[in-house]
Amino acid sequence: MTIEFIPYDKRFLSEMTQTWNDILIDGEAFPGEDLFNTEGFELMLLEQSATTCLLYNGVYAGFFIIHPNNIGRCAHTANASYCIDKRMRGKGLFKHVVKRSLWEAKQLGFQGMQFNAVVSNNTAAIHTYEINGFSIIGSIPKGFRLRNGIFTDMYIMHRSL
């Protein structure tokens, strides 16, 4: 198994857009509901502090983005979004992506990483975050509406870098 991380590469834009949209369609992890076309998605990617592609055995497998969690006096804490292509899930790649994003965020000068909307039933992600040093620092009761219309709790998670 070969895992490689490379800076954003436009040749993967179509696949990256589809990966993001698939997560939105699933309605289980990301708060957004509006799907992107490739042009709009690329504009969003170019606004990030970092966009990093994941290759698995030389094949596109996903990506992550990093940006400030907030503005001004709060901009020293990063936020990240992770996207694994549906065809690549279940291969243990997510733990590598999270670890790499923490390293990159530190290299960019961020002092911490915070997630604002970790869905409480996303136990695999929560476990991965916790083994990477994150703690649940808050809970928002029924803060996330799943695709099926049911409301579930979401967590705020943080770790220092």
Image: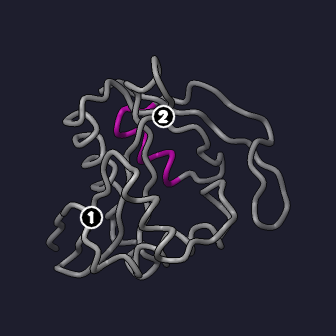
Q: Which structural element holds mark 1?
A: loop
Q: Give the residues in magenta.
A: 124-134
Q: Residue 28: percent from the left, percent from the top?
A: 65, 61
Q: What's the mark number on residue 110?
A: none
Q: Name the residue under label 2.
A: 69
Q: How is the image coloured?
A: one colour
Picture quarter containing residue 97? bottom left
- What residue do we see at 37% from left, 24% from top? 76
Marks 1 and 2 close (CB-CB < 8 Å): no
Residue 45: name its quadrant.
Answer: bottom left
Q: Is residue 5 above or below residue 117?
A: below
Task: Where is residue 133? Give x, y as percent.
Answer: 36, 32
Above or below residue 77? Residue 73 is above
Which residue is outermost to the right? 149
- Residue ranking furthest to the top: 73
Q: Which amino acid does label 1 sit on?
A: Tyr
Image position of 127 with respect to 150: above or below: above
Give residue 146's position: percent from left, percent from top: 75, 59
> In the image, what residue occupies the spot 54% across and 77% down?
37
Question: In the rendering, at what x and y percent does residue 26 appear?
Answer: 65, 71
**Residue positioned 74% across, 48% down in the render:** 144
Residue 66 is left or right of residue 44, and the answer is left
Residue 132 covered by magenta stretch = yes
Mark closest to the chain's N terminus, 1 or 2: 1
- The front one of 132 and 115 is 115
> What secondary structure is the stretch in magenta mostly built from?
helix
Amino acid type at mark 2: Asn
The alpha-carbon separation of the residues under discs 1 and 2 comes to 20 Å
Q: In which quarter of the image is the C terminus?
A: top left
Say if 62 sits above or below 80 in the image. below
- Residue matched to label 1: 8
